[in-house]
Image: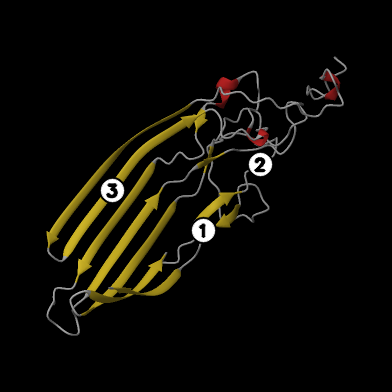
């Protein structure tokens, strides 16, 4: 057995021309990215007081590099083709449905001036990289090593769904001045939208690699969620136009 290969078949620092040099990073402009998608949008004004908009985007983003940071370097620098996969920002489905409803009672002192604007948004999850958390290939760099056989960005991130709404009322103060009160609610249903997954799954992690994170695990466990987006938020505002 070569003196620079350990009993597990992994290279050691003795394989390097200068064993005292842990890393020697070189950056080249060789990465490629491809995005393709389609958008379907419908807009309809049903009356002077009600409008509806629906938007659906189907897309796919592919690349072979995430960033010039060495933590995102190729697992095997001699096989860059193996890095070609879904991008970190790939999002297959995105749906937005919004409406604007205005008060029909324009001459009523009590009911006039109201406007209600609900918005429903759904996004499918972004992919994430499964990491071994160990130096699999013996290059003295462990932050980018994947479990043996795992493609890049093969994890499936959490989806996102939220219901927002805005209610406002305007008061005319003469011909040029308007006083507007608004109340806005974000994530009104208080749904927990997770944003990050513990993607360090260990070097022994085996197929299937296309796997989701789960809320049943703690953040310290592989595939447990580690962060979430804001919960329900409500804000009030006043605007004076003159």
Left or right of 70? Residue 94 is left
**Residue 99 coordinates in the image, percent (x, y):** 25, 61
From the viewer's perspective, is residue 112 above or below residue 118?
Answer: below
Quadrant hosting residue 29: top right
Spatial CA span between label 1 and label 3: 23 Å
Q: Earlier in the sequence, mark 1 or mark 3?
A: 3
Above or below for 49 versus 240? above
Give the colour scheme shown. Answer: secondary structure
Q: Secondary structure at mark 2?
A: loop
Circle 2 residue: 201
Residue at (54%, 58%) from the top-left corner? Answer: 228
| Residue at disc 1, secondary structure | loop
Q: Nearer the viewer, mark 2 or mark 1?
A: 1
Q: Residues within 10 Å of mark 3 (few under 14, many from 20)?
A: some
Residue 64 circle label: none
- Density class for disc 2 (Cα within 10 Å; few <14, some 14-19, many ≥20) is some
Q: Position of residue 118 (x, y in %)?
A: 30, 64
Which residue position is annotated with label 1? Answer: 229
Q: Quadrant location of the C terminus?
A: bottom left
Assign a secondary structure to mark 3. strand
Residue holding disc 3: 55
- Graded by Cα atoms within 10 Å as few (under 14), some (14 to 19) or many (20 or more), the crowding at tag 1 reads few
């Amino acid at each position: 057995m070569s003196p620079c290969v350990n009993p597990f078949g992994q290279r050691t620092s003795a394989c390097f021309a200068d064993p005292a040099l842990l890393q020697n990073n070189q950056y080249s402009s060789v990465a490629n990215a491809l995005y393709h998608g389609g958008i379907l949008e419908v807009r309809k004004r049903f009356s002077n007081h009600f409008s509806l908009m629906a938007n659906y985007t189907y897309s796919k983003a592919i690349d072979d590099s995430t960033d010039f940071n060495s933590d995102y370097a190729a697992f095997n620098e001699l096989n860059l083709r193996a890095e070609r996969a879904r991008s970190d920002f790939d999002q297959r489905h995105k749906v937005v449905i919004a409406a604007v409803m205005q008060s029909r009672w324009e001459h009523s002192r009590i009911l006039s001036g109201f406007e209600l604007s609900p918005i429903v948004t759904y996004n499918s999850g972004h992919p994430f990289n499964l990491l071994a958390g160990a130096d699999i290939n013996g290059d003295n760099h462990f932050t980018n090593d994947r479990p043996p056989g795992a493609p890049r960005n093969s994890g499936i991130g959490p989806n996102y769904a939220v219901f927002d709404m805005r209610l406002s009322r305007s008061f005319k103060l003469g011909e040029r001045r308007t006083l507007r009160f608004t109340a806005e609610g974000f994530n009104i249903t208080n749904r927990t939208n997770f944003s990050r997954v513990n993607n360090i799954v260990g070097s022994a992690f085996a197929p299937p690699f296309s796997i989701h994170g789960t809320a049943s695990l703690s953040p310290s466990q592989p595939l447990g969620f580690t962060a979430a987006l804001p919960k329900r938020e409500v804000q009030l505002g006043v605007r004076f136009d003159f």
